Amino acid sequence: MPRHMEVALCGLGLLLLSPLLLVIAVLLKLDSPGPVFFRQRRLGYQGRLFELIKFRSMVHRPAGAGPLVTAGGDR
């Protein structure tokens, strides 16, 4: 598939899914404090850096918010 068709289909997909993505973002913001998106730089094909952006799935806590050692049966 040519590159311009891939870009057009991805853009159309994002446009169609944008209401659902907006609802997810609002629910994340209401559920817990912290950012809505998780960002991370990763190595991709042939060692190229790219930035991964996804919805946060864990509770945001500042460093030092809890013990660094866990015990059996710990949540």
Image: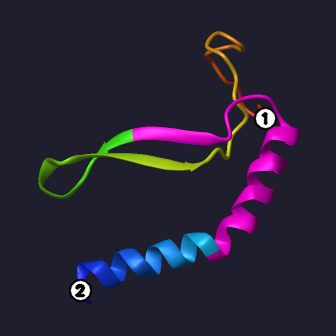
Near-viewer residue (31 or 23) = 23
Near-viewer residue (49 or 17) = 17
Q: Quadrant of the C terminus?
A: top right
Relative to residue 37, is residue 41 drawn left or right? left
Give the structural element (helix, strand or loop) at label 1: loop
Residue stretch rendered in magenta on the structure: 16-40
| Residue that lies at the very extreme toward the top in this rendered image | 64
Q: Residues within 10 Å of mark 2 (few under 14, many from 20)?
A: few
| Residue that lies at the very extreme toward the left in this rendered image | 46
Q: Is residue 50 above or below residue 7?
A: above
Q: Which is the main secondary structure of the residues drawn in magenta?
A: helix
Q: Residue at x 56, y 40 (%)?
A: 38
Q: Which residue is mark 1?
A: 75
- Asked whether residue 34 is drawn in magenta, I would say yes
- Quadrant hosting residue 66: top right
Q: Residue at x 37, y 74 (%)?
A: 7
| Mark 1 residue type | Arg
- Asked whether residue 70 is drawn in magenta, I would say no
Residue 71: percent from the left, percent from the top? 70, 25
Q: Residues within 10 Å of mark 1 (few under 14, many from 20)?
A: few
- Quadrant hosting residue 49: top left
Pair 2/1: label in front: 2
- Quadrant hosting residue 1: bottom left
Residue 43: percent from the left, percent from the top? 25, 46
Relative to residue 4, is residue 28 drawn left or right? right
Q: How far, Cα to Cα, is label 2 from label 1?
A: 49 Å
| Mark 2 residue type | Pro
User: Reading the chain from its start, which is encountered first: label 2 or label 1?
Assistant: 2
